[in-house]
Image (tube, rainbow, N blue to C red):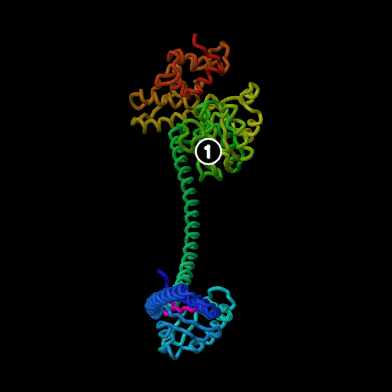
Protein backbone atom coordinates (compact mmCIF):
# COMPACT_ATOMS: atom_id res chain seq x y z
CA UNK A 1 0.00 0.00 0.00
CA UNK A 2 1.33 3.43 -1.03
CA UNK A 3 1.92 5.99 1.65
CA UNK A 4 0.35 9.46 1.45
CA UNK A 5 3.44 11.25 0.10
CA UNK A 6 3.90 8.58 -2.59
CA UNK A 7 0.21 8.94 -3.76
CA UNK A 8 0.49 12.70 -3.96
CA UNK A 9 3.67 12.46 -5.93
CA UNK A 10 2.05 10.04 -8.43
CA UNK A 11 -0.99 12.36 -8.90
CA UNK A 12 1.27 15.30 -9.55
CA UNK A 13 3.16 13.30 -12.14
CA UNK A 14 -0.06 12.24 -13.93
CA UNK A 15 -1.30 15.82 -13.96
CA UNK A 16 1.93 16.96 -15.52
CA UNK A 17 1.69 14.31 -18.25
CA UNK A 18 -1.95 15.25 -18.95
CA UNK A 19 -1.07 18.92 -19.31
CA UNK A 20 1.76 18.09 -21.69
CA UNK A 21 -0.54 15.93 -23.79
CA UNK A 22 -3.27 18.58 -23.82
CA UNK A 23 -0.79 21.19 -24.90
CA UNK A 24 0.40 19.02 -27.76
CA UNK A 25 -3.17 18.38 -28.83
CA UNK A 26 -3.92 22.06 -28.77
CA UNK A 27 -0.87 22.72 -30.94
CA UNK A 28 -2.07 20.23 -33.56
CA UNK A 29 -5.79 21.16 -33.45
CA UNK A 30 -5.76 22.44 -36.97
CA UNK A 31 -5.28 18.92 -38.16
CA UNK A 32 -8.45 17.13 -39.03
CA UNK A 33 -9.34 14.18 -36.76
CA UNK A 34 -11.15 11.17 -37.76
CA UNK A 35 -14.09 9.71 -35.87
CA UNK A 36 -11.96 6.93 -34.60
CA UNK A 37 -9.37 9.28 -33.25
CA UNK A 38 -12.08 11.35 -31.60
CA UNK A 39 -13.60 8.30 -29.97
CA UNK A 40 -10.22 7.07 -28.87
CA UNK A 41 -9.51 10.45 -27.31
CA UNK A 42 -12.85 10.46 -25.51
CA UNK A 43 -12.13 6.98 -24.24
CA UNK A 44 -8.75 8.07 -22.93
CA UNK A 45 -10.35 11.10 -21.27
CA UNK A 46 -12.85 8.88 -19.53
CA UNK A 47 -10.05 6.56 -18.38
CA UNK A 48 -8.05 9.53 -17.11
CA UNK A 49 -11.09 10.89 -15.39
CA UNK A 50 -11.67 7.59 -13.60
CA UNK A 51 -7.98 7.41 -12.69
CA UNK A 52 -8.16 10.93 -11.29
CA UNK A 53 -11.16 10.06 -9.20
CA UNK A 54 -9.42 6.95 -7.87
CA UNK A 55 -6.29 8.92 -7.17
CA UNK A 56 -8.38 11.58 -5.42
CA UNK A 57 -9.95 8.90 -3.20
CA UNK A 58 -6.50 7.47 -2.51
CA UNK A 59 -5.19 10.95 -1.71
CA UNK A 60 -8.06 11.62 0.72
CA UNK A 61 -7.35 8.31 2.48
CA UNK A 62 -3.62 9.13 2.66
CA UNK A 63 -4.43 12.58 4.05
CA UNK A 64 -6.63 10.99 6.72
CA UNK A 65 -3.91 8.51 7.66
CA UNK A 66 -1.35 11.29 7.75
CA UNK A 67 -3.60 13.35 10.00
CA UNK A 68 -4.10 10.35 12.30
CA UNK A 69 -0.37 9.71 12.43
CA UNK A 70 0.28 13.38 13.06
CA UNK A 71 -2.18 13.38 15.95
CA UNK A 72 -0.60 10.25 17.41
CA UNK A 73 2.93 11.62 17.08
CA UNK A 74 1.76 14.96 18.45
CA UNK A 75 0.46 13.20 21.53
CA UNK A 76 3.70 11.28 21.89
CA UNK A 77 5.64 14.51 21.33
CA UNK A 78 3.60 16.47 23.87
CA UNK A 79 3.47 13.87 26.61
CA UNK A 80 7.00 12.49 26.32
CA UNK A 81 8.83 12.44 29.71
CA UNK A 82 11.48 14.77 28.29
CA UNK A 83 11.12 18.35 27.14
CA UNK A 84 11.65 18.76 23.37
CA UNK A 85 12.53 22.13 21.80
CA UNK A 86 13.08 23.21 18.22
CA UNK A 87 15.30 26.30 18.01
CA UNK A 88 16.37 28.35 15.05
CA UNK A 89 19.95 29.31 14.40
CA UNK A 90 19.64 32.28 16.79
CA UNK A 91 18.40 30.14 19.67
CA UNK A 92 14.75 31.25 19.46
CA UNK A 93 12.09 28.71 20.34
CA UNK A 94 10.14 27.49 17.32
CA UNK A 95 8.45 24.42 18.76
CA UNK A 96 8.11 23.03 22.29
CA UNK A 97 6.22 20.10 23.74
CA UNK A 98 4.07 20.01 26.87
CA UNK A 99 6.86 18.84 29.20
CA UNK A 100 9.06 21.65 27.87
CA UNK A 101 6.44 24.27 28.86
CA UNK A 102 6.26 22.76 32.35
CA UNK A 103 10.03 22.87 32.69
CA UNK A 104 10.09 26.58 31.82
CA UNK A 105 6.82 27.35 33.69
CA UNK A 106 5.26 29.20 30.74
CA UNK A 107 2.43 28.61 28.28
CA UNK A 108 3.35 27.51 24.78
CA UNK A 109 2.20 30.74 23.14
CA UNK A 110 4.47 32.72 25.50
CA UNK A 111 7.46 30.66 24.49
CA UNK A 112 7.23 30.69 20.66
CA UNK A 113 9.77 32.99 19.02
CA UNK A 114 11.35 33.79 22.41
CA UNK A 115 15.11 33.28 22.90
CA UNK A 116 15.67 30.22 25.02
CA UNK A 117 18.42 32.00 26.91
CA UNK A 118 15.75 34.24 28.57
CA UNK A 119 14.61 31.22 30.58
CA UNK A 120 18.06 30.38 31.99
CA UNK A 121 18.43 31.69 35.54
CA UNK A 122 22.12 31.90 36.31
CA UNK A 123 24.64 33.97 34.27
CA UNK A 124 27.11 31.08 34.30
CA UNK A 125 24.43 28.79 32.88
CA UNK A 126 23.63 31.36 30.15
CA UNK A 127 27.26 31.55 29.12
CA UNK A 128 27.47 27.77 29.15
CA UNK A 129 24.33 27.49 26.95
CA UNK A 130 25.66 30.07 24.46
CA UNK A 131 28.83 28.04 24.04
CA UNK A 132 26.65 24.95 23.75
CA UNK A 133 24.66 26.45 20.81
CA UNK A 134 27.84 27.61 19.13
CA UNK A 135 29.31 24.11 19.24
CA UNK A 136 26.05 22.62 17.90
CA UNK A 137 25.91 25.03 14.94
CA UNK A 138 29.52 24.22 14.13
CA UNK A 139 28.31 20.67 13.45
CA UNK A 140 30.38 19.13 16.20
CA UNK A 141 27.83 16.42 16.71
CA UNK A 142 25.60 15.91 19.69
CA UNK A 143 26.43 18.35 22.49
CA UNK A 144 25.44 18.18 26.12
CA UNK A 145 25.39 20.59 29.03
CA UNK A 146 23.63 21.14 32.33
CA UNK A 147 21.94 24.47 33.04
CA UNK A 148 19.85 26.13 35.73
CA UNK A 149 16.33 27.03 34.49
CA UNK A 150 13.93 29.67 35.88
CA UNK A 151 11.05 27.23 36.39
CA UNK A 152 7.57 28.07 37.57
CA UNK A 153 8.19 28.18 41.33
CA UNK A 154 10.76 29.19 43.91
CA UNK A 155 12.52 25.84 43.64
CA UNK A 156 15.53 25.62 41.37
CA UNK A 157 15.14 23.46 38.26
CA UNK A 158 18.18 21.86 36.71
CA UNK A 159 17.99 20.58 33.15
CA UNK A 160 20.35 18.36 31.23
CA UNK A 161 20.39 19.64 27.62
CA UNK A 162 21.26 17.48 24.61
CA UNK A 163 21.24 19.19 21.17
CA UNK A 164 22.03 18.52 17.53
CA UNK A 165 21.87 20.74 14.41
CA UNK A 166 19.61 19.71 11.47
CA UNK A 167 19.78 21.34 8.00
CA UNK A 168 16.64 22.47 6.10
CA UNK A 169 15.78 21.08 2.63
CA UNK A 170 17.55 23.92 0.89
CA UNK A 171 20.57 23.58 3.12
CA UNK A 172 20.80 27.34 3.59
CA UNK A 173 19.76 27.41 7.25
CA UNK A 174 19.93 25.02 10.17
CA UNK A 175 17.62 24.49 13.05
CA UNK A 176 18.43 22.89 16.36
CA UNK A 177 16.67 19.97 18.00
CA UNK A 178 17.13 19.98 21.78
CA UNK A 179 15.95 17.68 24.52
CA UNK A 180 15.95 18.71 28.16
CA UNK A 181 15.69 16.24 31.05
CA UNK A 182 14.80 17.38 34.55
CA UNK A 183 17.76 16.32 36.68
CA UNK A 184 16.86 18.42 39.71
CA UNK A 185 16.16 15.36 41.90
CA UNK A 186 19.24 13.55 40.65
CA UNK A 187 21.33 16.68 41.18
CA UNK A 188 19.86 17.15 44.63
CA UNK A 189 20.61 13.53 45.40
CA UNK A 190 24.11 14.00 44.05
CA UNK A 191 24.55 17.06 46.23
CA UNK A 192 23.23 15.18 49.23
CA UNK A 193 25.51 12.27 48.37
CA UNK A 194 28.41 14.70 48.04
CA UNK A 195 27.56 16.25 51.41
CA UNK A 196 27.23 12.80 52.91
CA UNK A 197 30.51 11.83 51.23
CA UNK A 198 32.26 14.95 52.54
CA UNK A 199 30.81 14.33 56.01
CA UNK A 200 31.90 10.71 55.83
CA UNK A 201 35.33 11.76 54.61
CA UNK A 202 35.58 14.17 57.53
CA UNK A 203 34.48 11.46 59.96
CA UNK A 204 36.87 8.99 58.34
CA UNK A 205 39.76 11.46 58.53
CA UNK A 206 38.95 12.28 62.13
CA UNK A 207 38.55 8.60 62.99
CA UNK A 208 41.69 7.74 61.00
CA UNK A 209 43.61 10.37 62.95
CA UNK A 210 42.25 8.93 66.20
CA UNK A 211 43.06 5.38 65.09
CA UNK A 212 46.51 6.48 63.90
CA UNK A 213 47.17 8.08 67.24
CA UNK A 214 45.80 5.03 69.03
CA UNK A 215 47.88 2.81 66.73
CA UNK A 216 51.00 4.84 67.52
CA UNK A 217 50.27 4.49 71.21
CA UNK A 218 49.63 0.79 70.68
CA UNK A 219 52.88 0.41 68.74
CA UNK A 220 54.67 2.29 71.48
CA UNK A 221 53.08 0.01 74.08
CA UNK A 222 54.02 -2.99 71.92
CA UNK A 223 57.62 -1.75 71.71
CA UNK A 224 57.63 -1.16 75.44
CA UNK A 225 56.10 -4.57 76.01
CA UNK A 226 58.61 -6.15 73.62
CA UNK A 227 61.38 -4.42 75.51
CA UNK A 228 59.89 -5.62 78.77
CA UNK A 229 59.48 -9.12 77.33
CA UNK A 230 63.06 -9.08 76.09
CA UNK A 231 64.19 -7.91 79.51
CA UNK A 232 62.07 -10.60 81.10
CA UNK A 233 63.42 -13.18 78.66
CA UNK A 234 66.96 -12.05 79.42
CA UNK A 235 66.21 -12.15 83.13
CA UNK A 236 64.52 -15.52 82.68
CA UNK A 237 67.53 -16.88 80.81
CA UNK A 238 69.85 -15.53 83.47
CA UNK A 239 67.64 -16.98 86.20
CA UNK A 240 67.48 -20.29 84.34
CA UNK A 241 71.24 -20.30 83.94
CA UNK A 242 71.64 -19.49 87.62
CA UNK A 243 69.06 -22.14 88.47
CA UNK A 244 70.82 -24.73 86.31
CA UNK A 245 74.10 -23.70 87.80
CA UNK A 246 72.75 -23.85 91.35
CA UNK A 247 71.19 -27.24 90.66
CA UNK A 248 74.42 -28.52 89.19
CA UNK A 249 76.39 -26.99 92.06
CA UNK A 250 73.99 -28.60 94.49
CA UNK A 251 74.51 -31.99 92.82
CA UNK A 252 78.26 -31.62 92.85
CA UNK A 253 78.29 -30.30 96.40
CA UNK A 254 76.18 -33.26 97.51
CA UNK A 255 78.64 -35.54 95.77
CA UNK A 256 81.46 -33.61 97.39
CA UNK A 257 79.89 -34.04 100.82
CA UNK A 258 79.32 -37.74 100.15
CA UNK A 259 82.90 -38.18 98.95
CA UNK A 260 84.41 -35.81 101.48
CA UNK A 261 87.59 -37.02 103.12
CA UNK A 262 86.82 -38.78 106.35
CA UNK A 263 89.10 -36.51 108.33
CA UNK A 264 86.64 -33.68 108.09
CA UNK A 265 89.35 -31.29 109.35
CA UNK A 266 93.11 -31.07 109.46
CA UNK A 267 94.52 -33.34 112.18
CA UNK A 268 98.14 -33.27 113.16
CA UNK A 269 100.80 -31.08 114.73
CA UNK A 270 104.10 -32.61 113.61
CA UNK A 271 106.86 -30.75 111.84
CA UNK A 272 105.95 -32.16 108.42
CA UNK A 273 102.36 -31.04 108.65
CA UNK A 274 103.32 -27.68 110.16
CA UNK A 275 105.33 -26.94 107.03
CA UNK A 276 102.29 -27.86 104.92
CA UNK A 277 100.17 -25.43 106.96
CA UNK A 278 102.74 -22.70 106.36
CA UNK A 279 102.61 -23.31 102.60
CA UNK A 280 98.81 -23.25 102.68
CA UNK A 281 98.75 -19.90 104.49
CA UNK A 282 101.24 -18.47 101.99
CA UNK A 283 99.37 -19.41 98.82
CA UNK A 284 95.69 -19.23 99.92
CA UNK A 285 95.25 -15.41 99.53
CA UNK A 286 96.84 -15.53 96.08
CA UNK A 287 95.29 -16.69 92.82
CA UNK A 288 98.19 -18.97 91.90
CA UNK A 289 97.68 -22.52 90.65
CA UNK A 290 98.56 -25.11 93.32
CA UNK A 291 99.83 -28.65 92.75
CA UNK A 292 99.38 -30.94 95.78
CA UNK A 293 101.62 -34.00 95.80
CA UNK A 294 101.37 -37.04 98.02
CA UNK A 295 100.43 -40.67 98.29
CA UNK A 296 96.87 -41.85 98.21
CA UNK A 297 95.09 -41.31 101.50
CA UNK A 298 97.33 -38.53 102.80
CA UNK A 299 94.55 -35.91 102.70
CA UNK A 300 95.24 -33.97 99.49
CA UNK A 301 91.55 -33.10 99.15
CA UNK A 302 91.52 -31.83 102.72
CA UNK A 303 94.44 -29.50 101.99
CA UNK A 304 92.70 -28.27 98.80
CA UNK A 305 89.58 -27.40 100.82
CA UNK A 306 91.72 -25.65 103.42
CA UNK A 307 93.28 -23.46 100.69
CA UNK A 308 89.86 -22.61 99.28
CA UNK A 309 88.26 -21.94 102.68
CA UNK A 310 90.74 -19.17 103.58
CA UNK A 311 91.02 -17.68 100.07
CA UNK A 312 89.12 -14.71 98.61
CA UNK A 313 86.94 -17.19 96.71
CA UNK A 314 85.58 -18.89 99.81
CA UNK A 315 82.02 -17.56 99.16
CA UNK A 316 81.93 -19.43 95.85
CA UNK A 317 81.91 -23.24 95.64
CA UNK A 318 84.91 -25.47 95.20
CA UNK A 319 84.12 -28.05 92.54
CA UNK A 320 85.98 -31.34 92.88
CA UNK A 321 86.78 -33.51 89.86
CA UNK A 322 88.29 -36.96 90.37
CA UNK A 323 89.98 -37.54 87.02
CA UNK A 324 90.42 -41.26 87.71
CA UNK A 325 86.78 -41.96 88.54
CA UNK A 326 85.20 -40.33 85.46
CA UNK A 327 84.62 -42.60 82.43
CA UNK A 328 87.08 -41.88 79.65
CA UNK A 329 84.29 -41.24 77.11
CA UNK A 330 82.49 -38.75 79.39
CA UNK A 331 85.30 -36.88 81.08
CA UNK A 332 85.37 -34.10 78.46
CA UNK A 333 81.63 -33.40 78.70
CA UNK A 334 81.83 -33.56 82.50
CA UNK A 335 84.63 -31.01 82.59
CA UNK A 336 83.57 -28.62 79.82
CA UNK A 337 79.83 -29.32 79.45
CA UNK A 338 77.84 -30.20 76.38
CA UNK A 339 74.92 -28.99 74.27
CA UNK A 340 71.85 -31.07 73.60
CA UNK A 341 72.56 -33.48 70.74
CA UNK A 342 76.33 -33.00 70.92
CA UNK A 343 76.69 -36.79 70.72
CA UNK A 344 74.53 -39.89 70.92
CA UNK A 345 72.80 -39.97 74.28
CA UNK A 346 73.20 -36.24 74.97
CA UNK A 347 69.47 -35.61 75.51
CA UNK A 348 69.88 -32.37 77.44
CA UNK A 349 72.33 -29.54 77.85
CA UNK A 350 74.80 -30.01 80.69
CA UNK A 351 76.87 -27.37 82.43
CA UNK A 352 80.48 -28.50 82.83
CA UNK A 353 82.36 -28.40 86.09
CA UNK A 354 84.70 -25.67 84.90
CA UNK A 355 81.67 -23.46 84.23
CA UNK A 356 80.22 -24.33 87.64
CA UNK A 357 83.46 -23.30 89.29
CA UNK A 358 83.41 -19.84 87.64
CA UNK A 359 84.35 -17.34 90.34
CA UNK A 360 85.43 -20.14 92.68
CA UNK A 361 87.90 -23.00 92.76
CA UNK A 362 88.16 -26.26 90.85
CA UNK A 363 90.06 -29.17 92.42
CA UNK A 364 91.42 -31.64 89.87
CA UNK A 365 92.21 -34.73 91.91
CA UNK A 366 94.36 -37.47 90.36
CA UNK A 367 95.40 -35.11 87.55
CA UNK A 368 97.91 -37.71 86.37
CA UNK A 369 94.99 -39.88 85.20
CA UNK A 370 93.72 -37.27 82.71
CA UNK A 371 93.82 -38.50 79.09
CA UNK A 372 96.38 -36.86 76.80
CA UNK A 373 93.70 -35.54 74.41
CA UNK A 374 92.16 -33.43 77.21
CA UNK A 375 95.43 -32.12 78.61
CA UNK A 376 95.73 -29.65 75.70
CA UNK A 377 92.24 -28.29 76.36
CA UNK A 378 93.01 -27.98 80.08
CA UNK A 379 96.18 -26.10 79.22
CA UNK A 380 94.11 -23.58 77.21
CA UNK A 381 91.74 -23.08 80.16
CA UNK A 382 94.71 -22.39 82.46
CA UNK A 383 96.36 -20.01 79.98
CA UNK A 384 93.41 -18.21 78.39
CA UNK A 385 90.57 -18.80 80.84
CA UNK A 386 88.21 -19.92 78.06
CA UNK A 387 86.76 -23.04 76.45
CA UNK A 388 83.78 -24.29 74.39
CA UNK A 389 81.08 -26.74 75.36
CA UNK A 390 80.88 -29.90 73.28
CA UNK A 391 78.63 -29.20 70.30
CA UNK A 392 78.76 -25.40 70.71
CA UNK A 393 80.82 -22.86 68.73
CA UNK A 394 80.49 -20.19 71.44
CA UNK A 395 83.49 -19.49 73.64
CA UNK A 396 82.86 -19.30 77.39
CA UNK A 397 85.06 -17.06 79.53
CA UNK A 398 85.66 -18.11 83.14
CA UNK A 399 87.58 -16.85 86.15
CA UNK A 400 88.58 -19.58 88.54
CA UNK A 401 91.45 -20.96 90.59
CA UNK A 402 92.89 -24.37 89.78
CA UNK A 403 94.17 -26.74 92.44
CA UNK A 404 95.47 -30.07 91.16
CA UNK A 405 96.57 -33.16 93.08
CA UNK A 406 98.30 -36.39 92.15
CA UNK A 407 99.95 -39.40 93.76
CA UNK A 408 102.12 -39.94 90.68
CA UNK A 409 105.55 -38.60 89.84
CA UNK A 410 104.56 -36.34 86.94
CA UNK A 411 108.15 -35.92 85.81
CA UNK A 412 108.35 -39.70 85.29
CA UNK A 413 105.00 -39.54 83.48
CA UNK A 414 106.41 -36.84 81.17
CA UNK A 415 109.37 -39.07 80.35
CA UNK A 416 106.99 -41.96 79.68
CA UNK A 417 105.01 -39.72 77.29
CA UNK A 418 101.73 -39.90 79.21
CA UNK A 419 101.73 -36.31 80.52
CA UNK A 420 102.42 -33.01 78.78
CA UNK A 421 105.45 -31.10 80.01
CA UNK A 422 103.87 -27.67 79.29
CA UNK A 423 100.82 -28.63 81.37
CA UNK A 424 103.06 -29.75 84.23
CA UNK A 425 104.87 -26.40 84.22
CA UNK A 426 101.53 -24.58 84.30
CA UNK A 427 100.30 -26.69 87.22
CA UNK A 428 103.55 -26.72 89.19
CA UNK A 429 103.41 -23.00 90.08
CA UNK A 430 103.16 -23.62 93.82
CA UNK A 431 103.71 -27.26 94.78
CA UNK A 432 102.76 -28.57 98.23
CA UNK A 433 103.91 -32.07 99.20
CA UNK A 434 102.04 -33.88 101.98
CA UNK A 435 104.18 -36.36 103.93
CA UNK A 436 102.83 -39.93 104.25
CA UNK A 437 101.47 -41.16 107.58
CA UNK A 438 104.56 -43.32 108.27
CA UNK A 439 106.57 -40.09 108.44
CA UNK A 440 104.07 -38.59 110.88
CA UNK A 441 104.08 -41.18 113.70
CA UNK A 442 103.61 -38.44 116.28
CA UNK A 443 100.23 -37.60 114.69
CA UNK A 444 98.84 -41.17 114.90
CA UNK A 445 97.50 -40.80 118.49
CA UNK A 446 95.67 -37.65 117.38
CA UNK A 447 94.12 -39.50 114.45
CA UNK A 448 93.11 -42.40 116.72
CA UNK A 449 91.34 -40.04 119.13
CA UNK A 450 89.64 -38.27 116.23
CA UNK A 451 88.40 -41.48 114.64
CA UNK A 452 87.29 -42.94 117.99
CA UNK A 453 85.12 -39.90 118.59
CA UNK A 454 83.72 -40.08 115.05
CA UNK A 455 82.84 -43.78 115.05
CA UNK A 456 81.59 -43.84 118.66
CA UNK A 457 78.93 -41.35 117.52
CA UNK A 458 78.28 -43.20 114.30
CA UNK A 459 78.04 -46.74 115.75
CA UNK A 460 76.74 -45.83 119.19
CA UNK A 461 79.63 -47.12 121.35
CA UNK A 462 81.60 -45.58 124.20
CA UNK A 463 85.20 -46.70 123.67
CA UNK A 464 87.41 -44.29 125.56
CA UNK A 465 90.71 -46.10 126.14
CA UNK A 466 93.53 -47.22 123.85
CA UNK A 467 96.30 -49.37 125.28
CA UNK A 468 99.91 -48.34 124.87
CA UNK A 469 100.63 -51.62 123.10
CA UNK A 470 97.94 -50.83 120.50
CA UNK A 471 99.30 -47.31 120.00
CA UNK A 472 102.85 -48.65 119.63
CA UNK A 473 101.64 -51.23 117.09
CA UNK A 474 99.77 -48.55 115.15
CA UNK A 475 102.81 -46.24 115.19
CA UNK A 476 105.14 -49.04 114.14
CA UNK A 477 103.11 -50.03 111.05
CA UNK A 478 104.22 -48.49 107.74
CA UNK A 479 100.61 -47.63 106.59
CA UNK A 480 100.76 -47.98 102.80
CA UNK A 481 97.16 -46.74 102.68
CA UNK A 482 98.04 -43.75 104.90
CA UNK A 483 95.27 -42.00 106.84
CA UNK A 484 92.47 -43.70 104.88
CA UNK A 485 93.82 -47.13 105.86
CA UNK A 486 94.15 -46.03 109.51
CA UNK A 487 90.53 -44.83 109.45
CA UNK A 488 89.34 -48.21 108.14
CA UNK A 489 91.33 -50.08 110.82
CA UNK A 490 89.88 -47.91 113.63
CA UNK A 491 86.33 -48.29 112.29
CA UNK A 492 86.68 -52.09 112.22
CA UNK A 493 88.18 -52.06 115.70
CA UNK A 494 85.32 -49.97 117.08
CA UNK A 495 82.83 -52.41 115.59
CA UNK A 496 84.57 -55.51 117.00
CA UNK A 497 85.78 -54.13 120.35
CA UNK A 498 84.01 -55.22 123.55
CA UNK A 499 83.98 -52.85 126.50
CA UNK A 500 85.57 -49.44 126.80
CA UNK A 501 89.05 -50.36 125.45
CA UNK A 502 89.90 -50.36 121.76
CA UNK A 503 90.92 -53.78 120.49
CA UNK A 504 92.69 -53.94 117.14
CA UNK A 505 92.41 -57.43 115.62
CA UNK A 506 94.19 -56.80 112.29
CA UNK A 507 97.14 -59.23 112.07
CA UNK A 508 99.25 -56.98 109.89
CA UNK A 509 99.14 -54.44 112.72
CA UNK A 510 99.45 -56.80 115.68
CA UNK A 511 101.94 -59.29 114.22
CA UNK A 512 105.67 -59.21 114.91
CA UNK A 513 106.28 -57.71 111.49
CA UNK A 514 104.71 -54.50 112.68
CA UNK A 515 107.29 -53.90 115.35
CA UNK A 516 110.00 -53.13 112.86
CA UNK A 517 112.94 -55.06 111.39
CA UNK A 518 114.84 -57.64 113.48
CA UNK A 519 118.37 -56.65 114.28
CA UNK A 520 120.81 -57.88 111.71
CA UNK A 521 118.14 -58.23 108.96
CA UNK A 522 118.37 -55.94 105.95
CA UNK A 523 115.75 -53.15 105.75
CA UNK A 524 113.48 -53.38 102.69
CA UNK A 525 112.70 -50.28 100.62
CA UNK A 526 109.28 -48.72 101.23
CA UNK A 527 108.09 -49.56 97.70
CA UNK A 528 108.91 -53.26 98.28
CA UNK A 529 107.05 -53.25 101.56
CA UNK A 530 104.06 -51.62 99.86
CA UNK A 531 104.19 -54.19 97.03
CA UNK A 532 104.45 -57.13 99.45
CA UNK A 533 101.55 -55.85 101.51
CA UNK A 534 99.32 -55.37 98.47
CA UNK A 535 100.22 -58.85 97.21
CA UNK A 536 99.44 -60.33 100.65
CA UNK A 537 96.01 -58.69 100.80
CA UNK A 538 95.21 -59.73 97.21
CA UNK A 539 96.05 -63.32 98.04
CA UNK A 540 93.91 -63.09 101.15
CA UNK A 541 90.91 -61.80 99.14
CA UNK A 542 91.58 -64.30 96.33
CA UNK A 543 92.53 -61.42 94.01
CA UNK A 544 89.21 -59.65 94.46
CA UNK A 545 89.80 -55.90 94.12
CA UNK A 546 86.36 -54.29 94.58
CA UNK A 547 83.39 -55.10 96.77
CA UNK A 548 82.71 -55.38 100.49
CA UNK A 549 85.39 -58.02 101.02
CA UNK A 550 87.73 -56.74 98.30
CA UNK A 551 91.35 -55.74 98.71
CA UNK A 552 90.59 -52.03 98.10
CA UNK A 553 88.35 -51.93 101.21
CA UNK A 554 90.90 -53.74 103.38
CA UNK A 555 93.68 -51.46 102.21
CA UNK A 556 91.53 -48.36 102.49
CA UNK A 557 92.25 -47.43 98.87
CA UNK A 558 90.16 -46.34 95.92
CA UNK A 559 89.81 -49.34 93.51
CA UNK A 560 91.29 -47.30 90.65
CA UNK A 561 94.23 -46.30 92.86
CA UNK A 562 94.81 -49.92 93.84
CA UNK A 563 94.77 -50.99 90.18
CA UNK A 564 97.26 -48.19 89.38
CA UNK A 565 99.61 -49.52 92.09
CA UNK A 566 99.20 -53.09 90.84
CA UNK A 567 100.29 -51.93 87.39
CA UNK A 568 103.08 -49.81 88.88
CA UNK A 569 104.55 -52.70 90.91
CA UNK A 570 103.99 -55.23 88.14
CA UNK A 571 101.92 -57.48 90.42
CA UNK A 572 100.45 -60.38 88.44
CA UNK A 573 98.33 -63.30 89.58
CA UNK A 574 100.28 -66.61 89.45
Q: Position of residue 81 (x, y in %)?
A: 39, 77
Q: Which residue is situated farthest in the bottom direction here? A: 110
User: Which residue sits at x=42%, y=72%?
Assistant: 3
Total marks shown come to: 1
User: Which residue sits at x=52%, y=30%?
Assistant: 331
Q: Position of residue 23 (x, y in %)?
A: 53, 79
Q: Is 463 contained in the magenta span?
A: no
User: Which residue sits at x=55%, y=83%?
Assistant: 89
Q: Nearer the viewer, residue 92 or 255?
A: 92
**Residue 567 in view of the camera:** yes
Q: Is residue 38 above or below residue 408?
A: below
Check disc 1 and report the residue beneath it.
306
Q: Is residue 226 above or below residue 24?
A: above
Q: Is 180 contained in the magenta span?
A: yes
Q: Quadrant of the N terminus?
A: bottom left
Q: Position of residue 228 (x, y in %)?
A: 48, 57
Helix, strand or loop under label 1: helix
Q: Quadrant of residue 99?
A: bottom left
Circle 1 packing at 10 Å, graded few (<14), some (14-19), many (20+), is some
Q: Nearer the viewer, residue 278 or 246?
A: 246
Magenta stretch: dominant SS? strand
Q: Position of residue 95 (x, y in %)?
A: 46, 84
Q: Nearer the viewer, residue 281 or 13?
A: 13
Q: Nearer the viewer, residue 464 or 377?
A: 377
Q: Which residues are magenta?
A: 177-186
Amino acid sequence: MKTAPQSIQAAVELRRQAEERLLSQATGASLPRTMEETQRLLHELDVHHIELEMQNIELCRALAEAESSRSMYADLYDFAPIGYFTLDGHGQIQEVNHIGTKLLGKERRLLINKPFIFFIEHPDSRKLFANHLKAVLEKKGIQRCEIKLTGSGPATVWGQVQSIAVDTEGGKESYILSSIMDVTAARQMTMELQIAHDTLELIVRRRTAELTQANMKLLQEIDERKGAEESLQTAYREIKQLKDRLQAENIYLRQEIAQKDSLGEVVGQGNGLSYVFLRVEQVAPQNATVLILGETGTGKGMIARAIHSISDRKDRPMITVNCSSLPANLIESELFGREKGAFTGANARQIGRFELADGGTIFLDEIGEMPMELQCKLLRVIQEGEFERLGSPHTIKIDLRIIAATNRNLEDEIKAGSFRADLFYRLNVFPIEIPPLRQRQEDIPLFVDHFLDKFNKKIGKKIQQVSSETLNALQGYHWPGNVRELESVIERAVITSQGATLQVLDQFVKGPTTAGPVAGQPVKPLADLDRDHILQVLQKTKWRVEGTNGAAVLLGLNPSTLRARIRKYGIARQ
